[in-house]
Amino acid sequence: MMWCGRLCNVQQVRRPLLADFLNRRGLFLPSYTKFGERTSHTSPLVFCHGVFGSKINFSRSAKRLAAELGTECYLLDCRNHGASPWVEDMTLGTLAGDVVEFVAEHNLGPVNIIGHSLGGKQAMMVASSTPEVVTSAVIVDMFPVAFSSRQLDDTCAALSLIDVEGLGSREEASEQLATQIPNPAERSFILSNLIRTKGGWKWRINLPAISDHIADIRGYPTDVKPSHIPTLFPYGGRSDYMTPARVQEARRLFPNSTFVEIPDAGHIVHMDQPELFYTTVRDFLMVHG
């Protein structure tokens, strides 16, 4: 069973309105898609995507997990992404608060939270700051550390140079990005945020807000408390994000953690190796979810 939250199918020619995503207390609630119904003891699953991603990124895994584990899966659109509205604030603390507020608003109780990249940092922040709302966590190819790479800066700069109003096709945009982003699959992933309108093309992501918060996205607080909830860290065997020092810091902050290498996968593990990613997460949740 699939059900879409408010404005999940918003017309692409109109930007989602912030007022439609505020709860009774005036706090932000993300757009979401739901799969499944809870028929077992497994806690609901909440999925958080990475920067430039959207809630559809985990759809394949979420559908299968909902059916096999007998639980509900909620796929969220991060603020300034997908069908969620554009807002100025985009710190890690704010993103974590969005998830906590979502869980409370929908009376989900403790949840299993699964996050990739930026969504992984979002999930770790929730697990550390409000462990009472988390049953377990799955952190996909991300670690609780600050990153110094300027790749995100360069990507945002390259995207901002694309003349979307004069764009003839998504293929033209791909050609313009080929030098900065040589990997075709990565370019395709990012350019899924280009949507066609009656007047041509537009970005579905809020590039200015993302660019303004690059330091927040790359960073990670140094004053967080360790979280003892069961945590799985599946990482890509070809990814540059995993280093022994980062694993050591993850073990310090998440002492009840397990690390699993997904062979022949890069940073977007769930797309590079979907079957192995699925079975790894499923087996973990069957024990800890």
Image (tube, rainbow, N blue to C red):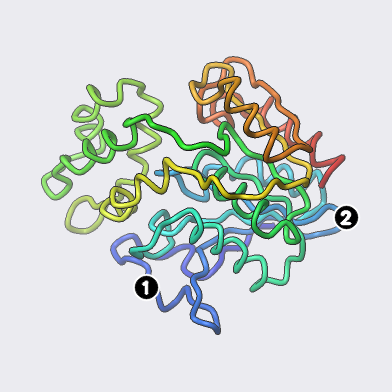
Name the residue rendered at 52%, 42% in the picture: 57
Name the residue rendered at 50%, 27% in the picture: 267
Of residues 70 and 158, the one nearer the viewer is 158
Q: CA distance from mark 2 to mark 1?
A: 36 Å
Left-right relation of 93 to 37: left
Q: Is residue 69 depicted above or below 7 in this figure?
A: above
Q: Residue furthest front?
A: 223
Of residues 92 and 107, the one nearer the viewer is 92
Q: Is residue 280 depicted above or below 218 in this figure?
A: above
Which numbered disc covers residue 17?
1
Q: Secondary structure at mark 1?
A: loop
Name the residue rendered at 64%, 73% in the picture: 105
Name the N-terminal-most of marks 2 and 1. Answer: 1
Q: Position of residue 212 (x, y in %)?
A: 29, 52
Q: Residue furthest bottom?
A: 24
Which numbered disc covers residue 40?
2
Three-letter residue code for mark 2: Ser
Q: Quadrant of the N terminus?
A: bottom right
Quadrant in which residue 126 is drawn? bottom right
Q: Residues within 10 Å of mark 2 (few under 14, many from 20)?
A: few
Q: Is residue 29 depicted above or below 146 in this figure?
A: below
Three-letter residue code for mark 1: Leu
Name the residue rendered at 78%, 42% in the picture: 230
Q: Position of residue 160 (x, y in %)?
A: 20, 44
Q: Position of residue 236 (x, y in %)?
A: 58, 23
Q: Secondary structure at mark 2?
A: loop
Q: Residues within 10 Å of mark 1 (few under 14, many from 20)?
A: some
